[in-house]
């Protein structure tokens, strides 16, 4: 395209004022530069668009025909500039991923709070797409642009992601009330030897919960006597309540069964399980889509009931351009 918006802007002002001097003043240009822009526009169009009457320029038939589409283009450019400055108007689709504990127990309230902070216009335009998987899968999808943001429980092993600590999660060792490690009488804390001999119900490899538990427990127990692996923490806590073994999970996952007495917390003698970090990640660079930018900038200072978690926000190193 050879015609520029600047030329059309000068054309409009000359058409309105009838002189290049007035147009030059309005645009903070020299009169000679304004005259040159009109001459160049006529050359590109291969049409004369003004009749010269002394020092005045009057639109001829060609100029009057050009004015409406020129004004439409200039109005369109102004609309684009206003849209670019209004971040809330850019709210659209947000693809967010979460590891299973976060997705099932923390994310719904988090998204409700995010929507509440938006204007009515932005809320109507928001389209949320949520993926729930284990931490490794969420991080991998963020890294290859399949997700805009990720919330995970364990460490992030994707080197091209920006990771932001979010909150702290309390981990507790739980068992069935009938399990031999359940607190009884004066014995309130579980010995390391009892934990070594126990049957552990664990998440699958790739789960952030599994990785955190391995990091916290293996240095003390040397190995975990694994009884079963499950794809969800919900399945694990139900299996533990049925007496199939013990586990270590986020308090927000097991709080309901602790309250009913279906599970009991078994404090360890040396605080082997305490807290783990929850994180939010994304591709770094800030060239994100509207909703991802807004959510990344949101305050991650939520209190999730009795769960004190430090989660990780995941986002890849380079946003799509």
Image (spheres, rainbow, N blue to C red):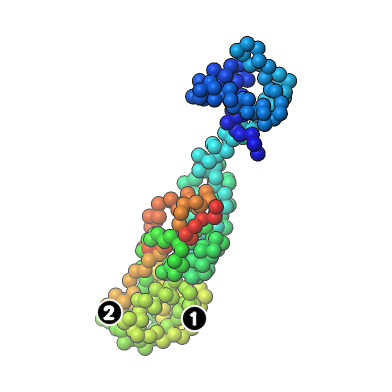
Q: Nearer the viewer, residue 93 or 53?
A: 53
- At 38% from the left edge and 55% from the top edge, which residue is drawn? 301
Task: Tell me where residue 278 appears, x and y as whole percent.
Answer: 40, 64
Q: Nearer the viewer, residue 150 or 230?
A: 150
Can residue 255 be seen in the rendering of this structure? no
Task: Tell me where residue 286 appears, x and y as whole percent.
Answer: 46, 52
Q: Earlier in the sequence, mark 2 or mark 1?
A: 1
The local crowd at label 1, few if under 14, some if 14 to 19, many if 20 or more residues have their Cα within 10 Å, is some
Q: Secondary structure at mark 2?
A: loop
Residue with the mark numbered 2? 269
Task: Tell me where residue 209 appears, x and y as whole percent.
Answer: 43, 72
Q: Nearer the viewer, residue 198 or 282?
A: 282
* Nearer mark to the viewer, of 2 and 1: 1
Mark 2 near mark 1, Cβ–Cβ under 8 Å? no
Quarter in which the N terminus is drawn: top right
Residue 229's disc is 1
CA distance for labels 2 and 1: 26 Å
- At 38% from the left edge and 57% from the top edge, which residue is drawn? 303
Residue 2, located in which quarter of the rendered image? top right
Question: Is 250 above or below relative to 117?
Answer: below
Q: Nearer the viewer, residue 25 or 235?
A: 25
The local crowd at label 2, few if under 14, some if 14 to 19, many if 20 or more residues have their Cα within 10 Å, is few
Residue 202, located in which quarter of the rendered image? bottom left
Task: Tell me where residue 37 appears, x and y as whole percent.
Answer: 59, 27
Question: Is 271 above or below relative to 111?
Answer: below
Can residue 93 be seen in the rendering of this structure? yes
Q: Secondary structure at mark 1?
A: strand
């Amino acid at each position: 395209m050879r015609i520029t918006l600047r030329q059309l802007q000068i054309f409009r002002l000359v058409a309105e004022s009838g002189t290049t001097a007035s147009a030059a003043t309005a645009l903070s240009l020299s009169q000679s530069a304004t005259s040159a822009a009109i001459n160049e526009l006529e050359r590109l169009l291969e049409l004369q668009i003004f009749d010269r009457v002394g020092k005045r320029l009057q639109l001829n038939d060609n100029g009057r025909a050009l004015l409406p589409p020129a004004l439409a283009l200039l109005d369109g450019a102004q609309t684009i500039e206003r849209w670019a400055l209004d971040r809330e108007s850019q709210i659209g689709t947000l693809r967010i991923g979460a590891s299973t504990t976060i997705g099932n127990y923390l994310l719904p309230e988090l998204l409700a709070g995010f929507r509440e902070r938006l204007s009515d216009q932005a809320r109507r335009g928001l389209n949320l797409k949520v993926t729930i998987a284990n931490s490794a899968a969420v991080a991998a999808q963020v890294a290859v642009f399949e997700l805009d943001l990720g919330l995970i429980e364990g460490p992030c092993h994707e080197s091209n992601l920006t990771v932001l600590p979010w909150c702290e999660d309390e981990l507790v060792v739980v068992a069935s009330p009938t399990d031999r490690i359940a607190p009884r009488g004066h014995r309130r804390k579980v010995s390391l030897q009892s934990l070594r001999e126990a049957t552990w119900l664990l998440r699958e490899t790739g789960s952030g919960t599994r990785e955190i538990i391995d990091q916290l427990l293996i240095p003390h127990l040397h190995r975990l006597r694994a009884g079963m692996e499950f794809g969800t923490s919900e399945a694990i806590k139900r299996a533990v309540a049925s007496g199939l073994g013990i586990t270590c999970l986020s308090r927000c996952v097991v709080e309901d069964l602790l309250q009913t007495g279906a599970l009991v917390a078994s404090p360890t003698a040396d605080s082997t399980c305490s807290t783990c970090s929850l994180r939010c990640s994304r591709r770094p660079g800030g060239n994100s889509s509207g909703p991802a930018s807004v959510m990344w900038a949101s305050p991650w200072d939520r209190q999730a009931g009795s769960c004190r978690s430090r989660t990780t926000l995941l986002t890849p190193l380079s946003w799509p351009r």
